[in-house]
Amino acid sequence: MNLFVNDIPVHIYKVDEQPHPGDYNLVINARKEPVTRARLSHHVWVQEVGEVELDAILALLNNTRVPFGLQSLHLNVTDY
C-alpha cells in the first residue's frame, strides 16, 4: 500500500514482504529502538511496526516540523 503524508511517500508492507534493496539506506527495528525525527533521513525502512509505533511515526510525519531530508519511508506493519 502506498500513501503520501506531507508529500513524503510512505510504503506499507506486510510482515513477510520487504522493499527492494536499492529503495532504502537505513533500517530501523521499531521493537528494539525508538523511531525519532533525527533518524528519519533519506530513504528509511522501519521493521516490526505495531499500532503504537505506527501512530508515533505518522504523528512525526504529520507534524508542522516534517523531518528534514526524509525522501521515502517503508514500513513493515505487524497487523496489515
Image: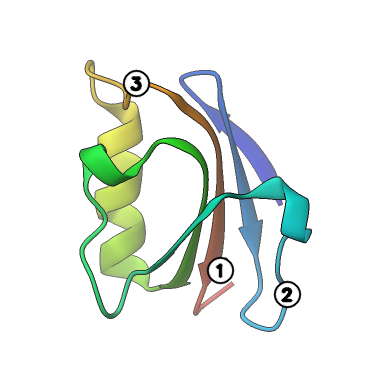
Callouts 2 and 3 close, C-beta under 8 Å = no
Which residue is the site of mark 3?
68
Which residue is the site of mark 2?
17
User: Which numbered disc flags the more N-terminal residue, 2 or 3?
Assistant: 2
Badge nearest the viewer, 2 or 3? 3
Disc 1 crowd rating (10 Å Cα; few below 14, some 14-19, many 20+) is many
Which residue is the site of mark 1?
76
Q: Which of 41 and 62 is in front in this view?
A: 41
User: Which numbered disc flags the more N-terminal residue, 3 or 1?
Assistant: 3
The three-letter amino acid code for the residue at tag 1 is Asn
Residue 60 position, x and y percent, is 26, 37
Residue 32 position, x and y percent, is 26, 79
Indicate the secondary structure of the residue bearing disc 1.
strand
User: How far apart are the two marked residues, 2 and 3, measured between alpha carbons?
Assistant: 27 Å
Judge left or right: residue 49 versus residue 67: right
The three-letter amino acid code for the residue at tag 2 is Glu
Identify the colour scheme used.
rainbow
For image coordinates 29% across by 54% down, the residue present is 55
Q: In this view, does 55 lie above or below 59?
A: below
Identify the image quadrant of the C terminus: bottom right
Indicate the secondary structure of the residue bearing disc 2.
loop
